[in-house]
Image (cartoon, helix red, strand yellow):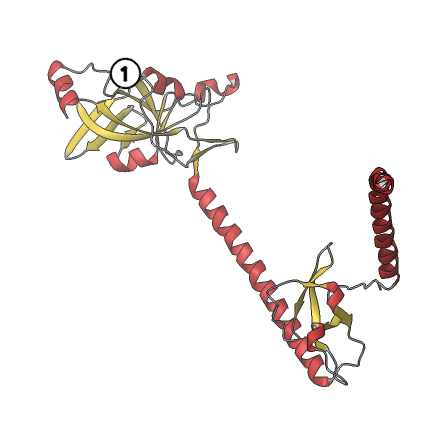
Amino acid sequence: MSNRIDELDKLDETRLLAIAGMYAEKRRRKHWHDQNIKTKWFQQGDLVLLYTLKKHKRKLKKRGIGPFVVSELTSSGAVRLETLDGAQMPNFINGSRLKKFEQPLTEGMIQQLHQAKTYKEGQIQLKEQAQIEAQERRQKMRTRREVKIMAVTGQNAEHEDFKVKPFTIHLQLTTDTREQFTTAMIDSGADCNVMSYDMWESLGMPKLTPSMLIFKSFSGFQTPSLGKLHVKTLIKKQIMEMVFDVTHKDQAAVDIILGRQWIYETNCQLDWITRQFVLHVGSSKVMGKKSELEAPTVQTQKQLSTK
């Protein structure tokens, strides 16, 4: 009975000794294993042999398959191979299964390597050409979205007597909730119709449709459009639907710019001497002077609200 009690008292000590012996044995085995490890250094383009599993080993038979070409290397020691013809293997292989190919190359191997190199160079050139073409397409799309606003004003007392004032006409803008009288400047250098942020705000900030346009000034300054605004416009009692691109706040010198789009649609003809204009709105011909500003009649207001 006393022997059994002594064994139970020493049970914890026996367990600790067993654990210590187990870890000592693991360290001894690791030390022996590390002594037999040979470090292999591969570089991209090296020729290597791929060794199969041990179960495929046969007496007097070489286990190495290949040669293969090292295509990619990872920091963890995995290697991606490709054949001499340039066909890349789908998976990575552990570097421990590879061995450098030390035998001299045959004429057939050299020819295969040369053909694979030529094919790779051709693929690289095609890829670079495709990237250049894609960049050119993006640049063309970006150029299409750029809208030039060519309105220029200057302050010079020396030429004040010869300064020609811009041609402006009066019009009325109408939304579902508000109406606004304003003066619009005709600019044949502008690609589209432009509305300032303040004018859009005075109209109640109606909903805009998305726009990819980029305003580009004469000096090269660029700013994106807030969006497009479809609005009814009254010019000399004639109503027409117009589309404006709205600028950001404090980015427009005038409230409304009528560009080449509007000039083309109305076939606008300007007389700079008499300051008169001729427009064609639908089948109607509109004539007037730059200084004219007529308030719409009651009949015109009803027509504008119902149309």
Q: Which residue is mark 1?
A: 181
Looking at the image, can residue 14 be seen?
Answer: yes
Q: Give how far across and how far down residue 252 sits, in percent.
A: 43, 23
Q: Give how far across and how far down residue 194 sits, in percent.
A: 37, 28
Give the camera-side residue of 48 and 201.
Answer: 48
For this orientation, the residue located farthest to the left is 299
Q: Is residue 155 above or below residue 146?
A: above
- The amino acid type of the residue labelled 1 equals Phe
Packing grade of label 1 (10 A; few <14, some 14-19, many >=20) is some
Residue 51 placement, left or right of 288: right
Give the camera-side residue of 140 and 255.
Answer: 140
Which of the image's four quarters has the C terminus? top left
Q: Is residue 203 above or below residue 40?
A: above
Q: Give how far across and how far down residue 149 sits, in percent.
A: 43, 32
Does dot 1 land on a helix, a strand or a loop? strand
**Residue occupying image coordinates x 56% and y 63%:** 126
Q: Is residue 263 above or below residue 293?
A: below
Q: How many marks?
A: 1
Q: Give how far across and how far down residue 34 sits, in percent.
A: 86, 59
**Residue occupying image coordinates x 26% and y 36%:** 265
Residue 213 placement, left or right of 35: left
Looking at the image, can residue 46 be seen?
Answer: no
**Residue occupying image coordinates x 55% and y 55%:** 131
Give the camera-side residue of 146 and 112.
Answer: 112
